[in-house]
Amino acid sequence: MKTVNTKYIIIGAGLSGLTTAHLLLKHGERDFLILEGRNRVGGRILTNNGVDIGATWLQDHHTNLNGLLDSLSLKKFEQYSKGQSVLVYNTMAPAHYFESQHNGPSAQRISGGSKALITKLTEGLKDKILLDTKALELTENSETVQIKTNAGIYIANKVVVTIPPKLASTLTFTPTLPDNLLGAMKQTHTWMSNAMKIGLVFKKPFWREKNFSGTVIGQVGPVIELYDHCCADNKTFALMGFINEGLRDVTAAQRKERILAYLEKYLGEEIRGYESYFEKDWSKDEFTSCENLKSVYMSPHYGNKHFEDFYFKEKLCFSGTETSPIYGGYLDGAVYSGITTARKLLQKELD
Ligand SMILES: Cc1cc2nc3c(=O)[nH]c(=O)nc-3n(C[C@H](O)[C@H](O)[C@H](O)COP(=O)(O)OP(=O)(O)OC[C@H]3O[C@@H](n4cnc5c(N)ncnc54)[C@H](O)[C@@H]3O)c2cc1C
């Protein structure tokens, strides 16, 4: 097995790890690597056929994310919500139709899909990212940390773990991590790790033509939330939503039919004329989820203070959205933690 030495290693090429790496590079540091277990970058950001099957929305108060988007010259646009939306509160009773009020802060999307952010961040980092490299064991040596992966041994002076804390708690750390840290890791729910999403791509936005917004909401049906997901340039037309977790254990064919029949009822038979249909169950993704998954509908607690410290005598630290005291769970929390970690490594304020 090969052995590679470097100054810094970031484990995980999600938004947090890539933000840190981007800032290291921007501030002249080139002696680092990013180890990524998946065969792609982005983590919980995943855009498939123009549809954000992972993270999608941001708002004005997400100042860290907005700042990063501005610095990368990425544009945003408003979530489409014109026309009639549907609220299903009882599948036996008629649905309630309503029009969105445009007087509050609106959800925004990233032009080009959320992956546009990942594509920009990885510019200049290509030779630093090692895909299909899954961290298994972290061992403290006197001046370094050794990471055993499926693809060799990596050794660094400092290591940043951006794996969601609950999942990271399943790795082997030698010496073992302090009980209070390990306890916090195990109790930190991985945001959206129980989510199941669908995307449907169409030739035309038939719902817009019928004065529907594309929004269908209700806890009682197979789809709990559905939204218009056409691209900013209006060249790709899509709907995207969250599937009711009750459908996790039926067959894919049964699930699809129940979803289509339900949406047909509220948006019309055109729903069956999709060009492509796809689903993603994040609870079945080994790089986001792990056993003992429980759905968490109330706001979980993020940014435990034990995530602020260094371990392994200043050689190991934790980052990632769940470690963030600011908008933990969200994209903004991932960016905040990524910036904070770069600042800690470089030991200076960053512009
Ligand atoms: C379905 C869904 C919808 C969402 N919607 C929104 C939204 O609309 N707005 C919003 O703000 N946020 C949303 N989020 C949350 C958002 O995606 C996250 O906050 C953000 O992407 C987290 O980034 P991260 O870098 O902290 O973690 P991650 O993206 O999870 O990155 C961690 C990385 O570590 C890698 N990894 C894991 N284990 C190993 C290992 N052993 N070795 C090496 N690498 C490993 C993973 O592959 C991954 O690339 C959503 C998430 C999901 C899943």
Image: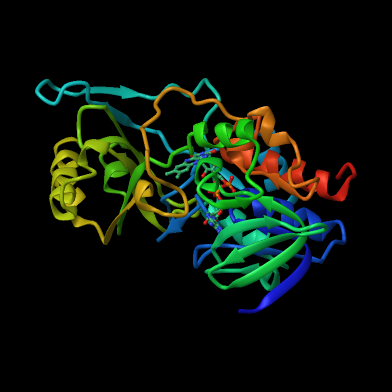
The residue under the point 67% across, 71% down is 126
The residue under the point 11% across, 20% down is 93
In percent of width and height, residue 73 lies at: 70, 52
Of residues 311 and 88, which is closer to you in this image? Answer: 311
Left or right: where 277 falls relative to 7: left
In percent of width and height, residue 17 lies at: 66, 53
Please, is residue 327 above or below residue 281 in the view?
Answer: above
Of residues 142 and 301, which is closer to you in this image? Answer: 142
According to the image, what is the colour scheme of the structure?
Answer: rainbow
Q: Can residue 74 be seen in this view?
A: no
In percent of width and height, residue 181 lies at: 63, 34
Q: Is residue 330 visible?
A: yes
Furthest residue toward bottom: 1
State the quadrant of the C terminus: top right
Left or right: where 266 falls relative to 169: left
Furthest residue toward right: 348
Q: Quadrant of residue 6?
A: bottom right
The residue under the point 18% across, 50% down is 256
Q: Quadrant of residue 241?
A: top left
Q: How many marks?
A: 0
State the quadrant of the N terminus: bottom right
Of residues 137 and 191, which is closer to you in this image? Answer: 137
Please, is residue 197 above or below residue 322 in the view?
Answer: below
The residue under the point 19% across, 54% down is 252
In percent of width and height, residue 56 lies at: 49, 44
